[in-house]
Amino acid sequence: MVFGLSKKGKSGGAAAPDAPIDVALIGCGPGGMAFLHALSNLRKEQGADGPASKINVTCFERSASAGGIWRDVPEDDPKRTKPENVPLVYDDMWANVPKEVMEFHDYTFQDHFKKATPAFLPRKDLLDYVIARNSVDGALDSVKYSHTVLSVTHDEGSSKFTVEVRDDTSGQTSKATYDKCIWAAGLHGAPEKPDDIMSILKDYEGKVLHSMEATEDFQEHVKGKKVMLVGDSSSAEDLALRAVKLGAKHVYICARSGDGDCSDTKSWPSDKITVVHGPPYKVVKGTTFKCQAVYWSDKRQRWRKDDEEDPVKVKDISTVVLCTGYLPNLDIIEDDLQYDDEGEWEASKGWAMENNALTISVGNPSPSKKLNVGATCYPDVYRGLLIDNPSMMYIMETFDPVSSFLDLDVNAHMLLSFLTGATEIPKEKDMHKANQKQLEAEMQIPWFRITIDPAYRAEVDELPDGHWSENADDERAMILNQMPADFMVRRLARDMKEYNYPVDFGDWKKLSKKGETFVKMLVASGNARSKIPKDESGWMTFRDVDPSRFVSIHTGTPACALPGHFMDIKGKTIATLE
């Protein structure tokens, strides 16, 4: 079995719990909801005497409702002053992946909307959808809302967790012990503001926001102004389009690595968005930035300016938005219980990359001594279990998830399988070994390896402009671009099969038709950015592409077109679009 353990004891070899298991579940966003929904279904399936009936879960959610960062901004806190409301995404956000890869098997979009809908949906519609699905049969009725977890500790002697909680309604605090603890509070707890960028911005005289702060008043910071986004990830992509919709004069996106969605996009509407390949390194005259391409120095372990590339001046910037990522809010958990979100690791001695379409261009360099976290696996977390203490569990997205909703749903089923004894928890050394194999398998995928291995990135960065790998229509590039999607779906198929998730994507070796269709939709989503027709580039975005590419794998319902060009649409729900 690839990246796993022997079949012996995998299923049915573990003992069901003899006594009740008390579980503290922290967070009722998509991950926490998925777990409660899965537990509710399993209890119905197994009956009153089944193993699931012995799993006693107390879910703590510090906000007054479910939904995590997808929630509506509460009417009593429009300025987001309460800690639980600070990470909320902006009200008019749209998804950047098609809904067809976010769809649940037991509650489809056809079930929810009763009609065909566009592939890309507004935040509000997805919030309503995920809550409607996960609240069936009262699965969320016992959640302790407005309860803030203050601390989580673990006692090795008793093997118990102590969770301290504040009831935010009464102000009273209490402590209780649990056998297991599940962290499902998400990865977007606080804005990440890199020190090097913040140091540069000390000389800047304009407005500085983090993407987490680009909320309902965003228009006043961008309308009629030149805006610079630092980072080229999904948040930069959506905020760039949003800024143009709200009347920005021009938007500049500064890409450091060039791995993000913005760098993959070949054209932008109205020619109002420019991608600059290189981060800012100096402020001139208060509002002008000098940017320059960089490369990673393995010797110095930091990014360095590429002196072979000319600096680029970006003038008269009124607003800077940091699209530099987020930090998980793990401070309440004692250090030994926290996973490592940076996740450095080393390749095994003698590891080598298999030949692929890029080998003739970049060779096969030896991997760097220190490697970055993988796209589908954190080195110290095995299938949701903290390897050093498997009683500490995590429901969270990986660095590059196939689909946030689907990944979290499968993750929830994995943990439930461990808790009920349907799957035996492996030995620590075996979990490390399985993760090592999975990470090294990721390294065989060129577009994964450049984010993991600085040595490989350095070679790829030396490819000349116009190299065939930049041409999405080149057959070799098409193969390379499908490899990450194929890997991620095969990993998902493996987990679905091993942990009895009720959808069949096949397995690691061979995908089912559903799995193959899923891969095609992921590739189509990427092509929506890289293959915008030149004669349509004045208005078209990735959300305007041919919707027939996206079809429900559960109902066969194809997506329908938006009611107009995305850049002209003002509504925040499907109903208001019409």
Image (cartoon, rainbow, N blue to C red):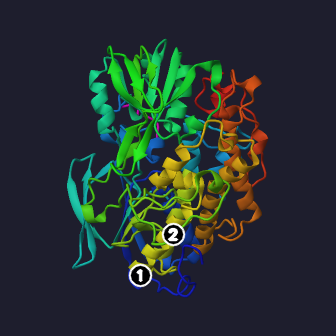
Q: Residue furthest top?
A: 224
Image height of 422 relative to 407, above or below: below
Judging from the image, what secondary structure is the residue with disc 1 in? loop
The percent position of residue 264, horizontal first and vertical second, equals: 61, 38
Q: Quadrant of residue 79?
A: top left
Q: Is residue 74 magenta?
A: yes
Specify the amino acid type for callout 2: Trp
Identify the residue shown where x is 41% and y is 41%: 325
Image side of residue 304 versus residue 265, left or right: left
Q: Residues within 10 Å of mark 1 (few under 14, many from 20)?
A: few
Q: Which residue is mark 1?
A: 427
Q: Which is more N-terminal, label 1 or label 2?
A: 2
- Nearer to us of marks 2 and 1 is 2
For image coordinates 74% across by 26% down, the residue present is 534
Helix, strand, or loop for circle 2?
loop
| For residue 288, side relative to residue 366 (left or right) | left
What segment carries the magenta color? 71-76
In which quadrant is the C terminus drawn?
top right
Residue 530 spot, x, y in % from top left: 67, 37
Q: Main secondary structure of the magenta part?
A: loop
Q: What residue sits 50% from the left and 33% below the top?
A: 236
Mark 2 to mark 1: distance in Å?
24 Å
Instruction: Classify mark 2: residues with Cα within 10 Å, few (<14), some (14-19) or many (20+).
Output: few
Residue 482 in the figure: left or right of residue 154:
right
The answer to whether the residues at label 2 and label 1 have Cβ atoms under 8 Å apart is: no
